[in-house]
Image (cartoon, helix red, strand yellow):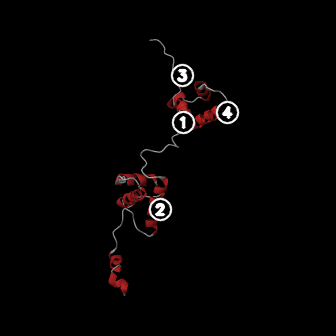
Amino acid sequence: MPLVAKSALILPTERGEPYIDIEAQIQAALTFLQTTEEDIPNLSAIAKRYEIPYHQFRAHWLGRLFKQERFSGSKKLSDDQEAAVYQYLDRLDTVGTCARIQTVSGCANAVLQQAHQAPEPPPLLSEQWARQFLASHPECFLCKQQTINGDRKNAHQPDDILR
């Protein structure tokens, strides 16, 4: 069986470096490209010099954004809208009211409806989205609500409060 030379292509999985390190090296190579005055730069040679994947480097040179800069297709709310939902949940917690999954998805749908300006109906978020939202905010958590004590329940009678 003949020996086959390994490809000169450097894959991120072979390098064992995290994506952020590769991005930093690509950013350094792009900065180097801006300082050079070549009309047609040799991207392959620069990729080899910085030890970065050529196709990834070329894509960024042509204008592709880094992962942290791209808008996620699965993200339904903007950062400001998510902050509004979070503030609503925080307010409910402050006044001592437990929010349920339906409350979270209802609040998010109301925020989407307020911000929606297109003629078609606004998108609706499901309870599954609400669960994922709570999972992405570790300071928010689900807890099972306890049944109210009989004495406390009787203390909330309107006739007793008015006296």
Residue picked out by circle 2:
87
Of all residues shown, which one is farthest toward the bottom?
A: 163
- Kind of residue indicated by mark 4: Thr
Residue picked out by circle 4:
35
In this view, the residue in front, 45 or 13, is 45
Which mark is on residue 112?
none
Mark-to-mark CA distance, 1 and 3: 25 Å
- Kind of residue indicated by mark 1: Gly
Mark-to-mark CA distance, 2 and 4: 46 Å
Q: Say whether disc 3 or disc 4 marks the residue closer to the N-terminus.
A: 3
Whether residue 100 sits left or right of residue 7 in the image: it is left
Instruction: Answer above or below: position of 88 versus 63.
Output: below
Q: Which callout, 2 or 4, points to the residue nearer the camera?
A: 4
Residue picked out by circle 1:
63
The quarter of the displayed image where residue 150 is located: bottom left
Instruction: Answer above or below: position of 160 versus 13.
Output: below
- The image shows residue 40 at horizontal and vertical percentages of 61, 25
Q: Say whether disc 1 or disc 3 marks the residue closer to the N-terminus.
A: 3
Q: Which callout, 1 or 2, points to the residue nearer the camera?
A: 1
Question: Mark 2 touching mark 4, by CB under 8 A?
Answer: no
Residue picked out by circle 3:
8
In this view, the residue in front, 151 or 113, is 113
Question: Mark 1 touching mark 3, by CB under 8 A?
Answer: no
Mark-to-mark CA distance, 3 and 4: 27 Å
